[in-house]
Amino acid sequence: MNKIVLFFLLTAGALLADDWVYEKSGDGVVAYTRKTVDSSFKEYKVETDVDARLSQVVALLMAVKDMPEWVDRCVEANIINEISPTESISRSVSAAPFPLKNREAVAHGKLTQDPKTHIVRLFSSGRANALPENSKYQRVKDVRGYWELSPKPGGKVHIKMIGHTDPGGVIPAALANHFVVTIPFNSIKNLRKQIKKEKYAKAKLSFIVD
């Protein structure tokens, strides 16, 4: 089964089971986690509402090279294979606490929009073998993510981000699970500020209906 489809099914099951545990909230952002059956690292879910158009949010998410400006602990990001305007394989590097190596992740992402509800979904799944490993970094074993952007009345968009990462290498699960909450939580807080920049506020995308 395709990894993206499988993750969607697992995510849908998790939401129906409603087994998320509240972790923290602040500045309009709420974070949850849940245990997984196949990993010692937890999954996370972060939600918020923003005053923005769908194109505005999508333009930010698709600007991979700008990720270090708002994604917490991200120090480098680039697209290594642009398949289409809505599908690509990208690489990102995240800072790890000393003496651990920085983590390098490679992932395939694909964006879709429902023609009726206009809800935008972005699925990503790890492609660890899509790029030769660099001994300078620790390659992330597994990464999967799901963004859901839902238009709301009054010019708002509800953002939901769900994900799971196995950072690879030797790292205490307790430390990794600490970052499971703080990294996405801080990232979404930063997104709320980043999205106000003019280049996103004025963005127009041919593949998105606002």
Image: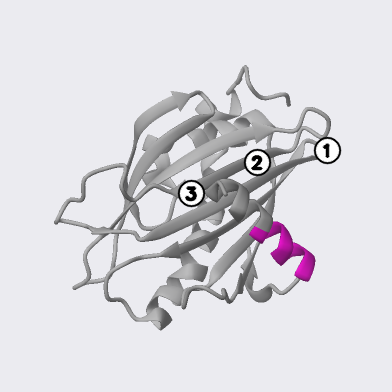
From the viewer's side, name the closer residue of 128 and 152.
128
Q: Is residue 111 above or below residue 181?
A: above
Q: Is residue 16 magenta?
A: yes
Question: Which residue is under mark 1?
Answer: 154
Does residue 192 appear to the left or right of 70 in the view shown? right
Comes first in the chain, label 2 or label 1:
2
Question: Which residue is under mark 2?
Answer: 121
Q: Residue at x 62, y 17 (%)?
A: 206
Label 3 and label 1: CA atoms lie apart by 33 Å
- Amino acid type at image mark 2: Arg
Q: Residues within 10 Å of mark 2 (few under 14, many from 20)?
A: some
Q: Is residue 114 above or below residue 172?
A: above
Q: Residue at x 58, y 76 (%)?
A: 35
Farthest residue to the top: give it.
Answer: 206
- Viewer-nearest of labels 2 and 1? 2
Image spot of residue 139 (x, y percent): 28, 57
Q: Residues within 10 Å of mark 3 (few under 14, many from 20)?
A: many
- Amino acid type at image mark 1: Gly
Does residue 151 appear to the left or right of 204 in the view shown? right
Q: Which residues are magenta?
A: 10-17
Question: Which residue is under mark 3?
Answer: 125
Q: Quadrant of residue 116?
A: top right
Disc 3 secondary structure class: strand
Image spot of residue 95 (x, y percent): 29, 60
Image spot of residue 111 (x, y percent): 59, 35
Disc 2 secondary structure class: strand
Label 3 and label 2: CA atoms lie apart by 13 Å
From the viewer's side, name the closer residue of 14 and 203.
14
From the viewer's side, name the closer residue of 85 and 68.
85
Q: Residues within 10 Å of mark 1 (few under 14, many from 20)?
A: few
